[in-house]
C-alpha cells in the first residue's frame, strides 16, 4: 500500500509502497483509513524543526494522526461488534507499564507513543491501533469531517483551559485549523465578541468569515496591536488565545489583555518567548498552556461535529488522494488552504 513516511531525521518525507500491517494482536484493531488531515505537526516533522527528535527510533514511520476509518479486523479481546464501525482515533497510545499507568493516572503516562509519530499512522490505506483509542462516530458523518475530531479536541481543550464565560471578549491569534476551531468553541462557551487575527493570511481569514466570524484582521505590515485597534477601543480582551506558534508575538498578546485577563498558549513554538513579568504581576494576568484534551472531551466533540457537520466542513478547503499527498503538504505549508484532507483513492471513487 502507499504510505507517506518520515525516513530519516532530516528535512523531507517520502511517498512509497510499504507492506500492509500484520493481523491485529490482542486489544488491537486494523482500520481501513478513509480520510486523514494534514496537521501543523506533520508540517514540522516534514521540515524537521526542533522538538521531534524522540521519533528517530521509530523511523521509518508513517505519518498521520488526524483520521477516520472503518474497523476492518479486530484482534483477540476486542468486542465482536467493533468490526465495521466507523471510528476516529485518539493518537496518544498508552504504555500501560509506567508508574502513572499502574496507578490508573493515564493522562500522565510517561511512555506514551503518538500514532503517526512514534508508531505508524494514517497516511496509508490501513493502520493498526489499540481498540481502547477508538472513538465511534456516526455512520452518516462525512469521513473528512470525522477526521477533524482530533484537532477539534485540541480547540475544545484550549477554550476549557481559558475558562471563557458568557459575555467575554476573546482574541484568537492564528486563523488556521486550531484558531478556527477555538473560535467555534468560544462561541459555544458564550463569548460576546470573537476577533481572529492572522499574518499574511487572506485565504484562511476568508474561511474564518465563512464560518460566521466577521471580526478578522491581518497584521501584515503592522503590529498586532494596530491590527486589533478597531476592537480595543471598547477595552482590552478578557481572553487571548495564541494559536500561531510565533514566540515574538507573545509579549504583545499579553499586553492586549485586561487586568486579570488570561492568555492561553496553544501554538507550538520553536524558540523561547520573552515576557515582561513585572507587568504580568502588577496586572494580575495569567498565562496558561494547553495541549492534549482528556478522554472525556472526545465524545463531546464528536457530538458537536455531528450536529454542525456542514458548518465545520467549511474548514476543509482541499481534498486530495493519497497519491497527491506531497502536493497537499505544499498547499498546507503555503497557508493557501485552511485544512487539507487526504482521502484514500477508493473513498473518492
Image (cartoon, helix red, strand yellow):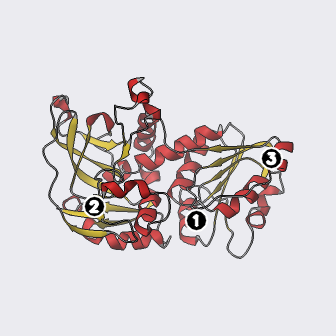
CA distance separating discs 3 and 2: 44 Å
* Label 1 – label 3 distance at C-alpha: 30 Å
Between residues 253 and 63, which one lies in front from this camera angle?
63
What number is the disc on residue 205? 1
Query: As displayed, is residue 242 above or below residue 328?
Result: above
Mark closest to the chain's N terminus, 1 or 3: 1
Residue of label 3: 280
Is there any visible trace of residue 256 in the rendered image? no
Q: Secondary structure at mark 3?
A: helix
The quadrant the N terminus occupies is bottom left
Residue lying at 48% horizontally and 65% vertically, measured from the top left: 49
Q: Is residue 151 above or below residue 10?
A: above
Q: What is the distance, in whole Å, between disc 2 and disc 1 at their CAs?
A: 36 Å
Instruction: Locate residue 114, reporting x and y percent.
Output: 37, 47
Residue 30 in the image: x percent, y percent? 19, 44
Residue indicated by mark 2: 60
Residue 235, compared with residue 15, is above or below; it is above
Amino acid at each position: 500500500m502507499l504510505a507517506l513516511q518520515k525516513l530519516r531525521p532530516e528535512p523531507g518525507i517520502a511517498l512509497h509502497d510499504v507492506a500492509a500491517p500484520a493481523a491485529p494482536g490482542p486489544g488491537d484493531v486494523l482500520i481501513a483509513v478513509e480520510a486523514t488531515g494534514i496537521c501543523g505537526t506533520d508540517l514540522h516533522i516534514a521540515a524537521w524543526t526542533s522538538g521531534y527528535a524522540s521519533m528517530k527510533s521509530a523511523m521509518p514511520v508513517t505519518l498521520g494522526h488526524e483520521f477516520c476509518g472503518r474497523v476492518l479486523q479486530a484482534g483477540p479481546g476486542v468486542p465482536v461488534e467493533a468490526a465495521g464501525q466507523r471510528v476516529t482515533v485518539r493518537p496518544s497510545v498508552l504504555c500501560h507499564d509506567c508508574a502513572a499507568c499502574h496507578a490508573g493516572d493515564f493522562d500522565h503516562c510517561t511512555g506514551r507513543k503518538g500514532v503517526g509519530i512514534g508508531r505508524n499512522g494514517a497516511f496509508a490505506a490501513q493502520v493498526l491501533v489499540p481498540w481502547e483509542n477508538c472513538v465511534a462516530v456516526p455512520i452518516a458523518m462525512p469521513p473528512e469531517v470525522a477526521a477533524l475530531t482530533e484537532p477539534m479536541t485540541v480547540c475544545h481543550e484550549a477554550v476549557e483551559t481559558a475558562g471563557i464565560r458568557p459575555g467575554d471578549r476573546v482574541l484568537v491569534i492564528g486563523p488556521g485549523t486550531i484558531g478556527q476551531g477555538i473560535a467555534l468553541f468560544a462561541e459555544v462557551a458564550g463569548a460576546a465578541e470573537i476577533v481572529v487575527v492572522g499574518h499574511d493570511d487572506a485565504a484562511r481569514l476568508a474561511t474564518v468569515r465563512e464560518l460566521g466570524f466577521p471580526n478578522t484582521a491581518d497584521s501584515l505590515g503592522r503590529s498586532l496591536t494596530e491590527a486589533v485597534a478597531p476592537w480595543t477601543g471598547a477595552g482590552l480582551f478578557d481572553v487571548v488565545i495564541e494559536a500561531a506558534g510565533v514566540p515574538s508575538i507573545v509579549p504583545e498578546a499579553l499586553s492586549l489583555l485586561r487586568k486579570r485577563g488570561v492568555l492561553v498558549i496553544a501554538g507550538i513554538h520553536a524558540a523561547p518567548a520573552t515576557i515582561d513579568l513585572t507587568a504580568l504581576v502588577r496586572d494580575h494576568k495569567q498565562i496558561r498552556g494547553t495541549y492534549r484534551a482528556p478522554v472525556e472531551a472526545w465524545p463531546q466533540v464528536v457530538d458537536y461535529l455531528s450536529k454542525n457537520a456542514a458548518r465545520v466542513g467549511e474548514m476543509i478547503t482541499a481534498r486530495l488522494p493519497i497519491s497527491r499527498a506531497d502536493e497537499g503538504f505544499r498547499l498546507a505549508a503555503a497557508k493557501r488552504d485552511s485544512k487539507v484532507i487526504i482521502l484514500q483513492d477508493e473513498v473518492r471513487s
